[in-house]
Amino acid sequence: MADEEKRWLAIVNPTAAGGRCGERIGDAVDELRWRGLAVTTRFTTKPGDASTLAAEGIAEGYTRIMAVGGDGTVNEVVNGIAKTRADGTITLATLPLGTSNSFLRDFNQQKLPNAIARITAGTAPPCDLVRCRILVDGVPTERWFINNVIVGFGANVGDTMNRRLKFMGKHGYSVGVFIEVARLKTPVMKITVDGVSWSGPVTMVNIGNSQFTGGVMHISPGALVDDGLFDVVTIGKLSRTGLLLAFPRIFNGTILSHPKITHARGKRLTLETDNPLPVLFDGDISGTTPLEAELVPGAILVIR
């Protein structure tokens, strides 16, 4: 392995998983160094730091960047990379030390030993990213994602989990589901994918570059991170009972066979709503609708 392929910048969110990430990172980095990798660690102290540290690392000459934490940390690192150099020359790896690591589930890397073995092997095929435009405090803002974006019910669940239930770990998602079912709304949305539009009351829409969200929910079965398309799964209007009955399908990967599902694949999307709705990017609320999305093929290399 060439020296450059051994040189990694690890961006660590020490508060991920209730602080367990900070407690475990030392042993994980020691293992990587024992395997011959030159790993430099830098720690985040506040939201947005991971994006800044990734951009600074690229400016310093790093071409291999490791996100250490959960889905939110990965998204921040991806944004730091993509807004600096989305040309397929930067390699991303993830050490799964967060509450959930949804993106890695596609590649059987949610267990730390598996992730360390893949990082050591160094194989990093191209991976698509999705560039979006949303509103942040009313200002049009660019935001990227590697895993998925959700508007509607799932975004509300994620927001409730992050604000009130994160101490429960993965179980917080299940509790969040019941909280949000009790106050279920089905706003009218207009969704356009590659020029084809449909509109009506929508419980939830998921734009997936990969298959899983929330660590365990198989919301976009069949989605591939390198096929040049994202998958759009739209759940139409459901009653509270109907939603609860449908929810097991999201976990077991059979959601696409539900009669209230619309499924499309494409490269460009617009999503319009009568009133601004929260947009969940890779597990964290990042702004509000309207949403524009464009897939950028092979924008990054990913260890998998």
Image: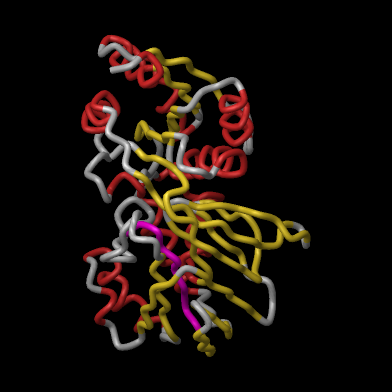
Residue 100: percent from the left, percent from the top?
37, 44
Counting the numbered discs, the total is 0
Q: Main secondary structure of the magenta part?
A: strand
Please, which colouring scheme is shown? secondary structure
255 up-or-down from 56: above or below: below
Closer-to-camera residue (178/89): 89
Q: Which residue lies at the image location 31% right of the left edge and 72% below the top edge? A: 247
* Quadrant position of the C terminus in the picture: top left
Compared across the picture, whether 228 is left or right of 256 comes to right
Residue 117 vertical position relative to residue 199 in the rendered view, above or below: above
Q: Which residues are magenta?
A: 202-211
Identify which residue is drawn at 59% across, 36% down: 51
Quadrant of the drawing holding the N terminus: top left
Return the x and y of residue 135 as percentages of the image width and height.
70, 62
Q: Is residue 204 magenta?
A: yes
Which of the 4 image quadrants contains residue 69? top left
Snapshot quadrant of residue 226: bottom left
For the view shown, which residue lies furthest in the right direction?
A: 138
Residue that appears at 40% across and 37% down: 98
In the image, is 249 to the left or to the right of 65? left
The quarter holding residue 23 reads: top left
Residue 182 shown in magenta: no
The residue under the point 38% across, 69% down is 231
Q: Relative to 256, is 81 above or below? A: above
Q: Position of residue 94 (x, y in %)?
A: 38, 34
270 or 267: nearer the viewer: 267
